[in-house]
Amino acid sequence: LADLVDDLKGELGGKFETLIVGLMTPPLAYDVTLLRNAIKGAGTDEKVLVEVLASRTCQQVKDIVGAYRQEYDDDLEEDVSGDTSGHFKRLLVILLQANRQKGIQEGTVESDAQVLFQAGEKKFGTDEQTFVTILGNRSAEHLRKVFDAYMKLSGYEMEESIKRETSGPLRDLLLAVVKCARSVPAYFAETLYYAMKGAGTDDETLIRVMVSRSEVDMMDIRAEFRRMFPSSLFSMIKGDTGGDYRKALLLLCGGDDA
């Protein structure tokens, strides 16, 4: 397989090559390589750190940490810590530890919502640590209940408060964590939409998402895309790309949900 990938690299070139090589890489190795390049490349690719660590399951993250150590003889948590700072770093480290609680802790839903309200909307300035701790450690099911309670309490969606109360990479990571707790396919539908919307295409993001979700939840992503946006994922890819690159992406997408 490695020989085949090497041969292809010589033959294809460009975005199409990146896409095909990505598809031929096992998912765990793909994630490990994404994170390594995000950290070790020129500057830190925060977008990749956010997307991968917010969207993968706890078991996937544990597997990534193990495979990263095996591949590079490095500690992923140390590498991420050395390359990031502040509450952004703290939340990434919590996500890397992959110790989210299981299920819904009925007794703490209301208090979690209350504490988040006190930490943000209710005070001058923001206690980011509270957002980091609660959003990083509770299960998705639990967080969905907390978001509902928070909405009743504050009159705001959790995302609105995060947008108002935080900024920079921390804001991006908190939003990704909240969106993934609500629905991972909806998070990726939105990621794909904004990769293609407007002038120019963010091909790196388009390729990364289509490769990493192709055998995971592409049908669900397509359904969410159709629900959230004016066109289907298929038609947007078709209008935004060309050549063999387009053909391959449309095959990964599957059908059109016109």
Image (cartoon, grey):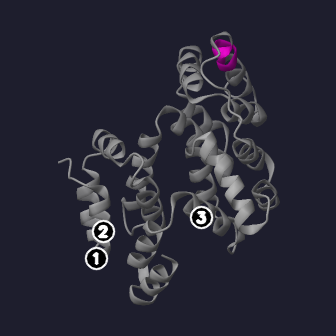
Residue 128 position within the rendered picture, expressed as x and y whole percent measured from the top left: 75, 36
| Disc on the earlier residue, 2 or 3 | 3
Residues at discs 2 and 1 in contact (Cβ within 8 Å): yes
Q: Gap in Å between the C-alphas at discs 2 and 1?
A: 6 Å
Residue at (20, 47) in percent of width and height: 257
Residue 119 position within the rendered picture, expressed as x and y whole percent measured from the top left: 74, 26
Residue on which the image places disc 2: 248
At mark 3, the secondary structure is: helix
| Identity, as a three-letter code, of the amino acid under mark 1 | Asp
Q: Which residues are magenta?
A: 108-113
| Identity, as a three-letter code, of the amino acid under mark 3 | Leu
Q: Nearer the viewer, residue 149 or 251?
A: 251
Q: Nearer the viewer, residue 125 or 248?
A: 248
Q: Is residue 202 visible?
A: no
Q: Gap in Å between the C-alphas at discs 2 and 3?
A: 21 Å
Residue on which the image places disc 3: 34
Q: Is residue 94 left or right of residue 201?
A: right
Residues at discs 3 and 1 in contact (Cβ within 8 Å): no
At mark 1, the secondary structure is: helix
Within the magenta stretch, is there residue 200?
no
Residue 244: mark: 1
Residue at (67, 66) in percent of width and height: 36
Residue 125 position within the rendered picture, expressed as x and y whole percent measured from the top left: 76, 34
